[in-house]
Image: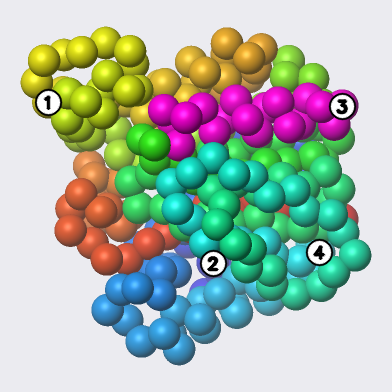
Amino acid sequence: MSIAGESEIVSELAAFGVRAFTTTRAVGTFGVNGDEPVRDVMGRWDALREELSPNGGRLATARQIHGTHILVHEPGWQGWLRGNEADGHLAMERGTALAVTVADCVPVFIVHPSGAIALLHSGWRGTASRIVERAIDALETRGCAPSDLRLHTGPSICGDCYEVSAEVYTQLTGRDPGKPATVDLRALIAEHARARGVRHITTSASCTRCDNDRFFSHRAGDSGRQIGVLIAPQ
């Protein structure tokens, strides 16, 4: 089974010479803290590496903590790198695959025509702390103008399904609803990106909670996790 073939492909970015996709329930979980044997989960990671290997010999992941740290990856290594605490990855040169684990949080794909890429894991904490702006700034300081970037927010919980406390809503929007309220993380991320000068933004039509038959959802009680994957092939 092709992992990419069973995934939601980000066709909007394909024109820029990258592969971008989010896996689905059909592929299986990539989270090691669920109910499946670790050997089965690791087998999926190995299959992913094998499938991506013709595009470059590097895969970068990290231990995610709902923060804003972004790892910048240089070439010169091979294999699978699992970094310390980070919720974002950036690669200026082609050949490094980036992956984040999600199940309601937003996988944010950012691409520059040169082949520079960034991939983020943005839950409510990362969104409130503007991790997307940090990634845009990091790309800009390396010569990638925000107006040239393409940004896509992948499958995640939608604004109709995601209810948060009044305190969290206030942190995200600056407005106090006085009671729990629903919020659209992908819309906020897009708003933050536009404020930094990004003009080309697309959003997946998939909601992990509404489409729970296709995606794992933490709010639906799933222990499984899908991954967002982004690579600019060599």
Please give the count of numbered marks on the rendered protein: 4
Q: Secondary structure at mark 4?
A: loop
Q: Is residue 196 left or right of residue 188?
A: right
Give the residue at x 44% y 79%: 41
Give the residue at x 54% y 40%: 68
Task: Give the residue number, with chain letter if any, for mark 3.
Answer: 143
Q: CA distance from mark 2 to mark 3?
A: 33 Å
Is 6 or 133 nearer to us in this picture? 133
Q: Nearer the viewer, mark 2 or mark 3?
A: 3
Q: Are marks 1 and 4 in contact (CB under 8 Å)?
A: no
Q: Amino acid at mark 4?
A: Gly
Instruction: Look at the image and tell me whether residue 184 can be seen.
Output: yes
Q: Which residues are magenta?
A: 126-143
Mark 2 surroundings within 10 Å by alpha-carbon count, few (fewer than 14), some (14 through 19), many (20 or more): many
- The answer to whether 106 is drawn above or below residue 113 in the figure is below
> Residue 181, percent across and down?
16, 23
Q: Are marks 1 and 3 in contact (CB under 8 Å)?
A: no
Q: Considering only order in the chain, which callout, 2 or 4, is on the residue closer to the N terminus?
A: 2
Q: Considering only order in the chain, which callout, 4 or 3, is on the residue closer to the N terminus?
A: 4
Task: Give the residue number, with chain letter if any, for mark 4.
Answer: 56
Task: Give the residue number, with chain letter if any, for mark 1.
Answer: 180
Q: Amino acid at mark 3?
A: Gly
Q: Amino acid at mark 2?
A: Ile
